Image (cartoon, helix red, strand yellow):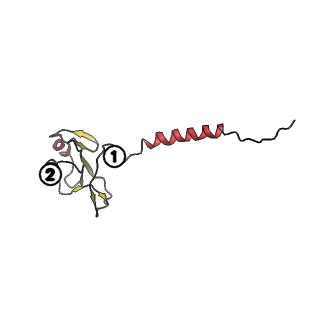
Amino acid sequence: MERELDQINVIPLVDVMLVLLVIVLTTATFISTGQIPVDLAKAKESGDRQDTPLVVTLTADGQLFMNDQPVGEDGLQNALASQPRQTLVVVRADRVTILERFVKVVDDIRGMGFQQVSLEVIRS
């Protein structure tokens, strides 16, 4: 009573593939470079520094964040007050940000004594 196998059972294969798909989709949501969506400007040259900078993010609608934490208008100065003045400060600004708002943020940072202020861009 031996029976030949003339069909392949694909149900276990489909089950395994669905489990792998769920694993990939759930882990992919945790892998992101920034939590705040900012459309960065492009530049041909960019610097490569290895130390950990303070990141100030300015979104298109004018919201201000420091290291992914929201800060108010005068909250930036309070947040930067405890930082050493030789620390690198990187400003991430959306490319449609109003120039006046961007200049005010950079001017406030420089006015507090931070000399190393950079703008984050995407290399084109």
Residue type, label 2? Val
Residue type, label 1? Gly
Q: Residues within 10 Å of mark 1 (few under 14, many from 20)?
A: few
Quarter of the rendering occupied by the C terminus: bottom left
Camera-side residue of 104 and 43:
43
Q: State the residue lying farthest toward the front.
A: 6
Q: State the residue lying farthest toward the bottom.
A: 45
Q: Is residue 14 left or right of residue 67?
A: right
Question: Residue 66's x, y, as percent?
Answer: 24, 44
Quadrant of residue 70 in the image?
Answer: top left
Question: Residue 65's x, y, as percent?
Answer: 24, 42
Camera-side residue of 71 and 101:
101
Name the residue carrying label 1: 34
Question: Residue 49's x, y, as percent?
Answer: 31, 59
In what element is the residue under mark 2? helix
In what element is the residue under mark 1? loop
Residue at 28% x, 58% y: name it. Answer: 42
Residue at 85% x, 38% y: name it. Answer: 2
Quarter of the rendering occupied by the N terminus: top right
Name the residue carrying label 2: 103
Residue at 61% x, 39% y: name it. Answer: 14
